[in-house]
């Protein structure tokens, strides 16, 4: 069988690779030179790039290229004569010569949208398992990546132990609410979360920029009537809105909203970000939604404001549709974590008799995704 071949295109400015199995892809010379893996281009120790874009001639071309027995690609560049080899799998995993049109609101394959169908399949891990078994931690973190939330059982009911959970994969994000905060009914609360009122599904702290991208809520006591926790997939809400009302979706994505918190002395937090955040290629990046801290919206043109409000209302109606929510009542020793850029959490109101004591803390997804990626490389499936 042929091992494949390389066709040099456009006087060496690009090359078309054909691998033995018939897969083809074009790469530019400048891209290949910039992404070379050899030790003159990247540190052998930490993999970081040793050169800058200015070290690469703008006239860079491919002088020669060939496919090795194992599908690797050997390239010689001009004018500098630099030679480098790309492993086949490395290059094939980074093909950009493909249809990049995914449409507004697209999501990568490791994310699954959900609705109340997940009620009977809530992702759950056990603290004893995740702190001792790397594969159990990997699976629990992978659930957070896929569904944007997960429950953890067997968490010690000692104050602050939720921080130990965050430290299994990353770092606690300390804020004006402290390293962690008490969520129980208080006299003169600095936040409506510290009352027995029901809370509409929301993301936390949208008035921060950047927002904390993870929130953990753990239960130390819960003997009240009511006080159930609900989670709603904001990415599913946004998708339903997009299908029903593309213009409303575009208004919530393209016009900034404003959020603020000024509930305690010395704290004046403000942000200007949309309810629905899209990346430059249309990827759905984040949801920010919180009725308590939404500030007057002043960045929507007058002629669009009525439609903006209609879309805002519809977003809220969809998120309150019982078909969208997963509900559970936390017991002492249980905790849930949410991706605070995606999954909205809510609470039902609760009675004055009995005690409900939760603790909350924030952390960030960079640490979680990094730990997960490292575990995926080192643990056996
Ligand atoms: C929060 O602290 O962000 C809450 O939403 C409180 C949730 C609860 O009390 O269940």
Image (tube, grey):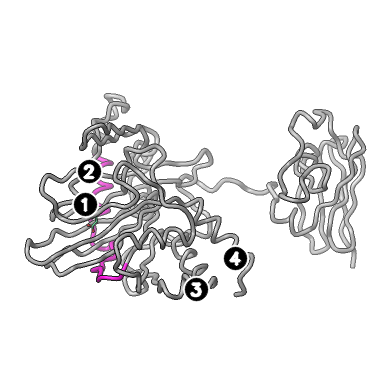
Cα separation between marks 3 and 2: 40 Å
- Which residue corresponds to mark 2? 291
- Which residue corresponds to mark 1? 200
Cα separation between marks 1 and 3: 36 Å
Q: Nearer the viewer, mark 2 or mark 4?
A: 4
Determine whether, in the image, residue 84 is placed left or right of residue 279.
right
Cα separation between marks 4 and 1: 36 Å
Q: Residue at x 30, y 34 (%)?
A: 269
Quarter placement of the N terminus: bottom right
Number of the label disc, if any, that sits on residue 132: 3
- Which residues lie in the magenta part? 310-334
Q: Are marks 3 and 2 in contact (CB under 8 Å)?
A: no
Q: Position of residue 359 (x, y in %)?
A: 27, 58
N-term mark: 2 or 1? 1
Residue at disc 4, secondary structure:
helix
Q: Say if disc 3 is inside 8 Å of ligand 1.
A: no
In the depicted view, which residue is nearer to us: 136 or 95?
Answer: 136
In the depicted view, which residue is nearer to us: 139 or 321?
Answer: 139
Q: Tell me: residue 273, above or below residue 331.
A: above
In the depicted view, which residue is nearer to us: 356 or 99?
Answer: 356
Within 10 Å of the Cα at label 1, are there few (<14), some (14-19), or many (20+) other Cα atoms?
some
N-term mark: 4 or 1? 1
N-term mark: 3 or 2? 3
Q: Are marks 2 and 1 in contact (CB under 8 Å)?
A: yes
Magenta span contains residue 322 = yes
Determine whether, in the image, residue 310 is placed left or right of residue 272.
left
Q: Residue at x 37, y 69 (%)?
A: 152
- Which residue corresponds to mark 4? 376
N-term mark: 4 or 3? 3
Q: Are marks 4 and 3 in contact (CB under 8 Å)?
A: no
């Amino acid at each position: 069988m042929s091992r494949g071949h390389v066709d040099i295109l456009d006087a060496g400015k690009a090359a078309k690779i054909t691998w033995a199995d018939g897969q083809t892809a074009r790469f530019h010379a400048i891209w290949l030179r910039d992404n070379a893996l050899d030790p003159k281009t990247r540190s052998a120790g930490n993999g970081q790039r040793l050169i800058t874009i200015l070290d690469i001639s703008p006239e860079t071309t491919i002088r020669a290229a060939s496919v090795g027995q194992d599908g690797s690609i050997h390239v010689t560049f001009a004018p500098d004569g630099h030679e480098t080899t790309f492993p086949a799998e490395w290059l094939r995993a980074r093909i950009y010569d493909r249809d990049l049109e995914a449409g507004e609101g697209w999501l990568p394959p490791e994310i699954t949208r959900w609705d109340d169908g997940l009620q009977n399949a809530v992702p759950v891990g056990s603290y004893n398992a995740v702190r001792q078994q790397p594969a159990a931690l990997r699976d629990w973190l992978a659930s957070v990546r896929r569904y944007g939330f997960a429950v953890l059982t067997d968490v010690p009911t000692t104050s602050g132990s939720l921080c130990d959970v965050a430290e299994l994969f990353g770092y606690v994000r300390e804020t004006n609410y402290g390293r962690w905060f008490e969520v129980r009914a208080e006299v003169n609360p600095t936040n409506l979360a510290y009352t027995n009122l029901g809370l509409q599904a929301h993301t936390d702290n949208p008035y921060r920029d950047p927002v904390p991208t993870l929130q953990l809520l753990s239960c130390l006591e819960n003997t009240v009537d009511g006080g159930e926790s609900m989670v709603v997939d904001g990415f599913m809400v946004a998708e339903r809105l997009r299908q029903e009302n593309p213009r409303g979706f575009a208004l919530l994505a393209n016009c900034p909203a404003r959020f603020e918190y000024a509930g305690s002395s010395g704290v004046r937090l403000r942000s200007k970000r949309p309810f629905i955040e899209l990346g430059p290629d249309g990827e759905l990046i984040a949801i920010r939604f919180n009725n308590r801290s939404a500030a007057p919206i002043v960045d929507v043109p007058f002629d669009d404001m009525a439609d903006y409000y209609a879309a805002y209302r519809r977003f809220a109606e969809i998120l309150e549709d019982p078909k969208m929510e997963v509900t559970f009542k936390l017991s002492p020793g249980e905790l849930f974590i949410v991706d605070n850029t995606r999954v909205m959490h809510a609470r039902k109101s609760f009675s004055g008799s009995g005690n409900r004591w939760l603790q909350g803390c924030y952390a960030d997804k960079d640490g979680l995704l990094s730990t997960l990626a490292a575990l995926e490389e080192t643990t056996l499936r």
